[in-house]
Image (tube, grey):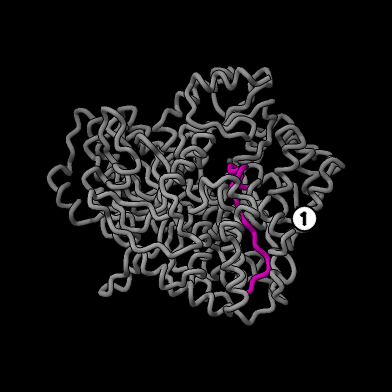
Amino acid sequence: MSTANAAAGQSADRGTAQPPTPVSFPPKEIKKQCDGIVTRYPTRMAACLPVLHVAQKHYGGWISPEVEAGVAEYLGVSDSHIRGLLTFYAMFNSKPSGRHEVWVCRTLTCWLRGAVQLRSTALEKAGVEACGVESPDGKFLVKNMECLGLCEEAPAVFIDGQPHVNVTPEKLSELLDACE
Amino acid sequence: MTAKKKAAAKKASTKKASAKKAAAPAKVVRAADGSYPETRILSANFGVKDSWTLPVAKKNGAYKSLEKAIKTMTPAEVIDEVKTSRVRGRGGAGFPTGVKWGFVPTDTDKAKYLVLNADESEPGTFKDRFLMELDPHLVLEGCLLCAYATGLDVIYIYVRGEYPLSIARLEGAIEEAREAGLLGKDILGKKGFNVEAHVHPGAGAYICGEETGMLESLEGKRGHPRIKPPFPAVEGAFGCPTVINNVETLAHVPSIIEHGGAWFGDLGIAPDPDNPRAMGSAGTKLMGLSGDIKTPGCWEFEFGITVRELIEQYGGGALDGRTIKAVIPGGLSMPVLTADELDVPMGFDALVKVGSGLGTATAIVMDDACDMVEACENIAHFFADESCGQCTPCREGCHWMEKIFTRIKAGDGTPADLDLLEHLFVNIEGRTICALADAAVWPLRSILRKFRHEFLAKMPGHADPHAADAKASDAAAPVGAK
């Protein structure tokens, strides 16, 4: 897989000739939190994951190339290091992630208990063909996640970071209808 | 989460004899009717109102063992007690915990770290979540005992990002403990016993549960497992000596210190004196059930309950009108057992003996409605998705296996595909840096061998070239054996 292709696939802004202009990071709303995280570790690089969590939450659920560059500058690592993390870890989004992020567990226990129907329901509600694509109205991003660790109450779904268990297609429809 | 709380409360009321900090529970015996009782040591406080707060935890005896250790024992004595207990790691590998602690150098001037493995991303596994959500102070006390025994400075609790409540409860517990003088400088008045604790959130990667992948992730990198040696006890996080233990393992330590290692070692299954590799399964274990059964859940038993007893007495048996077909006894990464093989005790050595493994002791049950080819496709997809991509056999092999299962599912497979799979298994297993590749092969190979007829049924018009010797080879090569 060529880097150019991978980058072009990430977002419309990626893979262009011009490097992104880094945002000034951290913004004042999350400065104290981020500075606090950095003090927990002997290296600044170690703060990458917790800081990216805070940044993703602050910037509407995804990390743009500009935020990526800002975080990289703040933690003294390269932009590509941060990009590497965003593409490696399933919880980080490097594309717009809709107003509501829906995770449907797909691994064995949930699959046995009806996860396939839940995924169909979620995709239908979002009006998209496949997981990982923001819905055209910008409302939902449905993600196919591996085991969420709620197996005793399978099947499980997360909506905006909140777990829902023993979910039926009907219940999921209601939950998604309730999203603004 | 209300259903779970209700279940926990029900459990608490049915067995109030929570023995954790009072008299030591006696060795379990099956009742006259054959029922296998719970032994609640780790789970003694599950279902207690606000069990995760410091005042309630203290009322139930939290941090008494830490006080005992600090005031009456040397660090070496604590390690000896844990060695005597024969407690083995609860994360899947089953390494003796006391021995692991003994590897940490005492004569180094580097910082030392504990990385608590709370990444619990093994599919079907949720036992550590119960501990972190319902008794975070027990977990923290275990960490502090480890810190005292091995002389370490900082505790990092690596919790998977998908466990928001666990993260919140642990952060709350750390905050309470810090205010109460249980973390920070001169803990409980002990001069020079300085320990800090931090929660480090993961971000959704199975491989970060592998201990060296976890270290890389803690250091802010992609979770690529490291080649060993050097082992983490010598060179782990940030190049310093590091202990890595599972949540449940360390949650056992307070009761071991309270009642003594010999007490713990007497519980469960004794080692086999004639086989030095059969180190026994000492103590109790949180065991879980999920999948096609009536009442999935998590319970604590002394080692010894059989898989069938667990499913029938606690899991409520098969769903109405269905029969159980297969069980993976320990998370997803272990070889499968058929319905005829369930009378085996849930224990480290017993399950290895029948060609499977204890893993995380949280079984996934599949019934007759489950298509084993599709199950294999699902399992192979998981490992293909979660492979970190470092080693070619795993990165390419897992995707290749998934493609073959997809092809067979679609009716386009031939018996040659089954031979190709066997060929892939041999060239994936044991040929990579970490055990993820092995973990992918074990369930798939065992399902393919034990349910070969289901694969052949999707290949109409093709005769099995190995029909004659299938039986013989099954007997000769136990599934899961290297």
Q: Position of residue B61 (x, y in %)?
A: 57, 61
Residue at 24%, 50% in the rendered image? B34
| Chain letter for the residue marked with disc 1 in the picture | A
Identity of the residue furthest to the bottom in this view: B107
Q: Position of residue A167 (x, y in %)?
A: 49, 27
Q: Quadrant of residue B214?
A: bottom right
Image height of A120 relative to A34, above or below = above
Image height of A90 relative to A179, above or below = below
SS state under label 1: helix
Question: Can you identify the residue that label 1 sits on?
Answer: A38
Q: Quadrant of residue A103?
A: top right
Q: Position of residue B36 (x, y in %)?
A: 30, 51
Identity of the residue furthest to the left in this view: B468
Quadrant containing the C terminus of chain B in the rendered view = bottom left
Quadrant containing the N terminus of chain B in the rendered view = top right
Of B367 and B228, which appears nearest the observer? B367
The stretch of residues the image draws in magenta is B150-167
The answer to whether B300 appears left or right of A137 in the picture is left
The answer to whether B152 appears left or right of B416 in the picture is right
Question: Callout 1, which amino acid?
Answer: Val
Q: Position of residue A79 (x, y in %)?
A: 75, 47
Q: Is residue B434 magenta?
A: no
The answer to whether B463 appears left or right of B309 in the picture is left
Residue B208 seen from this side: no
Of B122 and B32, which appears nearest the observer? B32
Residue at 60%, 55% in the rendered image? B57
Q: Quadrant of residue B192?
A: bottom right
Residue B66 seen from this side: yes
Q: How many numbered circles does the render carry?
A: 1
Density class for disc 1 (Cα within 10 Å; few <14, some 14-19, many ≥20) is some
Residue at 30%, 49% in the rendered image? B307
